[in-house]
Image (cartoon, rainbow, N blue to C red):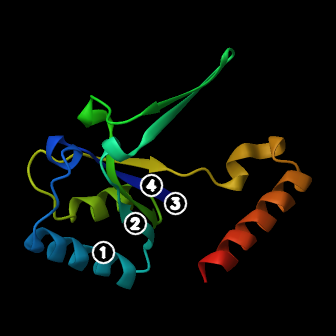
Amino acid sequence: MRFMVILKANEESEAGVLPDEGTLAAMGRYNEELVKAGVMLAGEGLQSSAKGARVQFADTGITVIDGPFTEAKELIAGFWLIQVGSKEEAIEWVKRCPLGGGAEVEIRQVFEADDFGANLTPELRDAEERLRARVSERQQ
């Protein structure tokens, strides 16, 4: 099972305040644990929403809105993509994350091909597998 672990933004991260050396070192050790355990598939911190944009789709057209965005608690400051056996295991890994008070993390399961049932026809499944193989080649 794959899970996206979403680190919520806060006023400091949205203001562009960078983590100090101690925080970076602690997060590095945590990431190393995830890698050594074979759990971490990807993980990155994200720049503040001031450097981002939102693209909204409507029947009347597409609108692009440049950041920053006002509601920091609804924004994302970083993420991990992990592969574990259960949601409970994902929670246990997240509980070990060296985050300070006030931090909030959301855990969301990633869809797998089988979750789509008959709607993911053999042709669509083959096309998806080809795309994943191409992406994997680019990462090597």
Kindly report the distance in space between the C-alpha atoms of the residues bearing marks 1 and 4: 14 Å
Does label 3 or label 2 sit earlier along the sequence?
Answer: 3
Residue 63 lies left or right of residue 88; in this view the side is right
Q: Residue at x 78, y 58 (%)?
A: 128
Q: Where residue 84 sits: x, y (%)?
A: 46, 66
Does label 1 or label 4 sit earlier along the sequence?
Answer: 4
User: Is 93 drawn above or below residue 30 in the view shown?
Assistant: above
**Which of 59/28 is in front?**
59
- Type of amino acid under label 4: Met
Q: Would you name the residue on which mark 4 appears? A: 4
Q: Would you name the residue on which mark 1 appears? A: 31
Q: Would you name the residue on which mark 2 appears? A: 43
Q: Where residue 37 sits: x, y (%)?
A: 38, 81
Instruction: Kindly report which numbered mark, 3 or 2, lies closer to the viewer in this rendering.
Output: 2
The answer to the question of whether label 1 and label 2 lie on touching residues, with beta carbons closer than 8 A, is yes
Q: Would you name the residue on which mark 3 appears? A: 2
The quarter of the displayed image where residue 97 is located: bottom left
Instruction: Kindly report which numbered mark, 1 or 3, lies closer to the viewer in this rendering.
Output: 1
